[in-house]
Image (tube, rainbow, N blue to C red):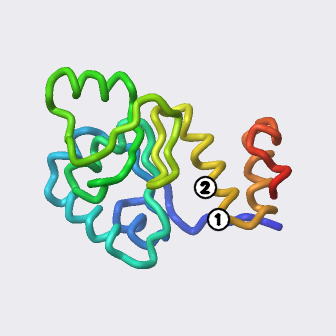
Amino acid sequence: MPLRAHLKYPPTHMEAARLSTSLSSLAQTLQRSQKFVKFIQTRYADPRLKAILMICTGSMCLARTRILDGHQVCSNKFVLRMAANGKTLYNKIKWIGDRRWVIELWSVGGVTCGIDLAAEYARQHFNPEIVRAAIHCINTHADHFNLRRL
């Protein structure tokens, strides 16, 4: 079964708005942009949105949008520690620094955990044949992503 992508590379944020899933591993400068905050709030309010996957410090960027308030969220452990020590950690979020990932809002503590997060999200939400094809394309061990459950 051929897989086809219909977005140009790299997709613009307006093209991403048409996706049912938004990915966030964003530069800290976006955090200060009111346009960015409004964009994320609008996407999060859209009932067609299935998830926002936050990788590494992406969750720190999304903190200002207030969509994470009251939720358990992972972020980069080093950055969490720095923010806590500098008393700049946004306290309306239940920051988790001792786990690789939290599925409540699909967040991971670091870049390398992002592969695991994406694989688990795909396993739960996509056709098993597509997931198998993707896993084999990235040359990884199938057992790592628990393909027996597919």
The quadrant of the picture occupied by the C terminus is bottom right
Q: Residue 121 carries which label?
A: 2
The quadrant of the picture occupied by the N terminus is bottom right
Residue at x 70% of width, y 57% of height: 123
Residue at x 28% of width, y 45% of height: 61
Q: Which of 49 and 11 is in front in this view?
A: 49
Does 36 sit above or below residue 102? below
Is 5 situated left or right of 93 in this image? right
Tell me where residue 72 appears, x and y as whole percent. 39, 47
Residue at x 64% of width, y 50% of height: 120
Q: Nearer the viewer, residue 123 or 6?
A: 123
Query: Is there a contact, CB below 8 Å, between mark 2 and mark 1?
Result: yes
Alpha-carbon span between mark 2 and mark 1: 6 Å
- The quadrant holding residue 115 is top right
Tell me where residue 113 appears, x and y as whole percent. 55, 35
Does 46 sit above or below residue 144? below
Residue corresponding to mark 1:
125
Assign a secondary structure to mark 2.
Answer: helix
User: How many C-alpha atoms fall within 10 Å of the one at disc 2: few (<14), some, or many (≥20)?
Assistant: some
Tell me where residue 127 appears, x and y as whole percent. 74, 67
User: How many C-alpha atoms fall within 10 Å of the one at disc 1: few (<14), some, or many (≥20)?
Assistant: few
